């Protein structure tokens, strides 16, 4: 059996009801078998155990703090915190609920990713009429694996996307740990279980941590809710996700290790998506990535600045709290990095420092009014070179049009 993949040693191939029904496994629902993704995501998130509902008192406290966060973020940034015209609300969830909601929220992006990855799972057209490729030549030949992979592609991709979402659910505190827009709406998710575990591990005051997460969630929601920011970020994410070109020969070779009678062989093949898919970037992805990183770095730098200014005034333990949370986000494990790479993100310390330096540079030269220009329109979004040189950005946005 292979060593644990990027998502750890959890084995979703045991105690999963769907694996007792092969018909469901191979039901073609388009490029992804979403039922497989949902079940594996929930299993991974809850680590195979039943989860309790969130304590109603926890829900009430987060809802109260969300109202404080909304007022403070709106006042400081001048941005609308709502995408619907109603008030923002926070919903406390357990891990499996977060996984289900996130799978649905990311479904368009995952669909684009699956179409890109799935294109490598098809048998070449010139082999379609080959008797060996269709299994008509007696014993099943190796060439038939290409056709088999095509049939299995939706199930394979469902497994991998479920593993990804389940992994994220075990670590995320809110819904914007990854700066990925979600469907329009003003209900923000907070994973109460993870909040409780992290707070106890770091001995952080519970209400201070809750308020920090509410402020961070509302700040992300305000920026990602801006139509031109949302549109540009989605364009870049979708373009990157659609640019993969995995090696179908490597995929076929890995599939040849499956023994249908041996459950362990399935875990060996599917348990490590990093080895299974590979993450080599295409030329098109390398072209897109600098713009994607520049935009996400700017967003995160602005939110860090906002958190320091607003959270520093409201949260007594803000210094130690911010240090613990910022250390947490860059101390990512192999699974976190795998998911980031599939989206074209690099959420390293350098990435956050780059955005913070840009924002601080603008504020030092031009104050809060200068920084407010950042989100005025798509024209004001900085280029990769401008993120590294705030003066260039300022000169460009003041050129006559």
Image (cartoon, rainbow, N blue to C red):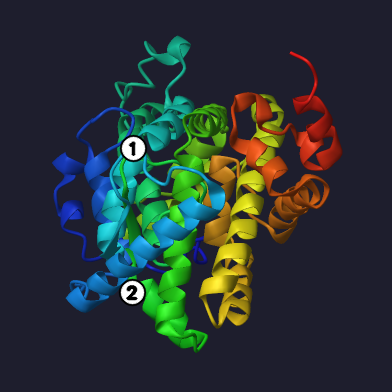
Determine the secondary structure under disc 2. helix
Disc 1 and disc 2 in contact, CB within 8 angstroms: no
Q: Position of residue 205 (x, y in %)?
A: 46, 85
- Look at the image and tell me whether residue 64 can be seen: yes
Mark in the foreground, 1 or 2: 1
- Residue 307 vertical position relative to residue 229 in the rendered view, above or below: below
Identified at 49% across, 33% down, the residue is 230
Q: Mark 1, residues whose alpha carbon is within 10 Å: few (<14), some, or many (≥20)?
A: few
Quadrant where the C terminus lies? Answer: top right
Identified at 54% across, 43% down, the residue is 342
Answer left or right for 359 relative to 299. right
Query: Mark 1 vs mark 2: which is more N-terminal?
Result: 1
Q: Which residue is mark 2?
A: 193
Identified at 69% across, 39% down, the residue is 294
Q: Residue furthest bottom?
A: 203
Front-most of 347 and 124? 347
Front-most of 112 and 105? 105
Q: Position of residue 11 (x, y in %)?
A: 35, 65
Q: Which mark is residue 369?
A: none
Front-most of 209 and 7? 209
Picture quarter containing residue 9?
bottom left
Q: Position of residue 4 (x, y in %)?
A: 49, 66
* Spatial CA span between label 1 and label 2: 25 Å
- Look at the image and tell me whether residue 172 can be seen: no
Picture quarter containing residue 43?
bottom left
Q: Which residue is mark 1?
A: 184
Identified at 59% across, 31% down, the residue is 376
Answer left or right for 278 relative to 380. left
Determine the secondary structure under disc 1. loop
């Amino acid at each position: 059996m292979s060593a644990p993949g990027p998502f750890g040693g959890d084995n979703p191939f045991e105690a999963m009801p769907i694996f007792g029904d092969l018909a469901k496994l191979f039901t073609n629902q388009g490029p992804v078998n979403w039922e497989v993704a949902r079940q594996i995501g929930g299993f991974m998130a809850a680590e195979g155990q039943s989860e309790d509902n969130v304590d109603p008192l926890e829900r009430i406290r987060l809802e109260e703090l969300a109202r404080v966060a909304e007022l403070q973020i709106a006042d400081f940034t001048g941005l609308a915190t709502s995408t619907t015209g109603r008030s923002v609300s926070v919903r406390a969830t357990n891990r499996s609920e977060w996984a289900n909601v996130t799978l649905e929220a990311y479904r368009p992006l995952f669909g684009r990713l699956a179409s890109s990855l799935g294109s490598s799972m098809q048998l070449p057209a010139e082999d379609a009429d080959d008797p060996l490729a269709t299994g008509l030549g007696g014993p099943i030949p190796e060439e038939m694996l290409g056709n088999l992979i095509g049939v299995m592609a939706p199930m394979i991709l469902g497994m991998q996307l479920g593993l990804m979402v389940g992994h994220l659910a075990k670590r995320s505190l809110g819904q914007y740990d990854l700066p990925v827009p979600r469907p329009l709406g003003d209900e923000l998710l907070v994973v109460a279980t993870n909040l409780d575990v992290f707070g106890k591990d770091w001995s952080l005051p519970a209400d201070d941590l809750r308020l920090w997460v509410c402020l961070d969630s509302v700040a992300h929601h305000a920026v990602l809710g801006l139509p031109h920011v949302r549109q540009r970020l989605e364009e870049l994410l979708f373009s990157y996700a659609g640019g993969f070109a995995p090696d179908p020969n490597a995929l076929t070779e890995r599939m040849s290790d499956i023994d249908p009678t041996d459950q362990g062989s399935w875990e060996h093949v599917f348990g490590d998506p990093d080895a299974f898919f590979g993450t080599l970037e295409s030329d098109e992805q390398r072209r897109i990535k600098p713009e994607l990183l520049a935009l996400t770095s700017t967003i995160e730098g602005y939110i860090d600045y906002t958190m320091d200014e607003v959270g520093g005034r409201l949260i007594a333990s803000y210094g130690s709290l911010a240090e613990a949370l910022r250390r947490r986000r860059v101390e990512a494990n192999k699974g976190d990095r795998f998911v980031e790479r599939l989206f074209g993100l690099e959420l390293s310390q350098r990435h956050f420092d780059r955005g913070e330096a840009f924002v601080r540079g603008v504020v030092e030269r031009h104050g809060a009014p200068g920084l407010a220009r950042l989100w005025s329109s798509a024209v004001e979004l900085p280029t990769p070179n401008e993120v590294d040189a705030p003066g260039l950005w300022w000169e460009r946005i003041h050129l006559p049009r």
